[in-house]
């Protein structure tokens, strides 16, 4: 999916749309069953969230990395009530973050690859895991939950 196709699923718009491309992929049999979402974002260096974080040494803030994982995960909901686009009946709202770990900084010029899976659903709540890496090196991982709110 390109950015315009992602906008049909996510209600987010610039400057808060933080996934540039995404795809659904099968989870390797050795790791489980089902689908995972894979998203990508290239850090250009002029993003609003880099201004002042940190002068002379820009680093993508951890909270932005968490938002990127969550937006990537929402691609898995394309067939849910949220999947009909920004005018749909439900919006994804964060309800929790746990076990978040930051391993390496993400900087301008990096292409962040995000992988997310939904581990459990108890409507309207979705429980997910995600990770982000640059050049195959883990930068962020965590578990999060969100609800689809009408």
Image (tube, rainbow, N blue to C red):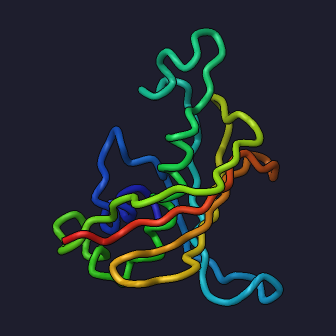
Residue 139 lies, with reference to residue 119, above or below; the image says above
Image coordinates for residue 84, horizontal then vertical, percent: 25, 76
Image position of 97 (left or right of 137): left
Which quadrant would the C terminus be assigned to in this image? bottom left
Work out whether residue 110 or residue 150 is closer to the camera in this orientation and state it.
150
Vertical arrangement, residue 61 with respect to residue 149, above or below: above
Q: Give coordinates of residue 79: x percent, y percent.
A: 36, 84
Image side of residue 10 versus residue 55, left or right: left
Q: Residue at x 62, y 88 (%)?
A: 34
Residue 110 is situated, as x and y percent measured from the top left of the image, at: 68, 37
How many numbered circles are shown? 0
Q: Residue at image x 78%, y 82%?
A: 31
Q: Quadrant of residue 11?
A: bottom left
Residue beneath the point at 62% across and 78% down: 25
In the picture provided, is 40 more to the left or to the right than 67? right
Q: Residue at point 76% right, 42% down? A: 103
Position of 48 with respect to 86 (left or right) is right
Q: Nearer the viewer, residue 108 or 129?
A: 129
Extreme top residue here?
A: 56
Q: Position of residue 16 (x, y in %)?
A: 36, 43
């Amino acid at each position: 999916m390109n950015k315009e196709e992602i906008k049909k699923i996510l209600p987010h718009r610039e400057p808060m749309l933080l996934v540039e491309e995404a795809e659904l992929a099968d989870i390797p049999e050795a790791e489980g069953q089902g689908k995972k979402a894979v998203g990508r974002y290239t850090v250009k260096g002029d993003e609003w969230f880099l201004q002042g974080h940190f002068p002379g040494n820009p680093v993508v803030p951890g909270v932005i990395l968490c938002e990127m994982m969550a937006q990537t995960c929402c691609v898995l909901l394309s067939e849910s009530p949220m999947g009909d686009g920004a005018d749909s009946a439900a919006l994804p709202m964060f309800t929790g973050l746990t076990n978040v770990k930051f391993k390496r900084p993400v900087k301008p010029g990096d292409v962040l690859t995000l992988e997310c899976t939904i581990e459990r659903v108890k409507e309207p709540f979705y429980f997910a895991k995600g990770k982000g890496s640059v050049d195959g090196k883990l930068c962020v991982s965590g578990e999060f939950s969100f609800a689809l709110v009408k």
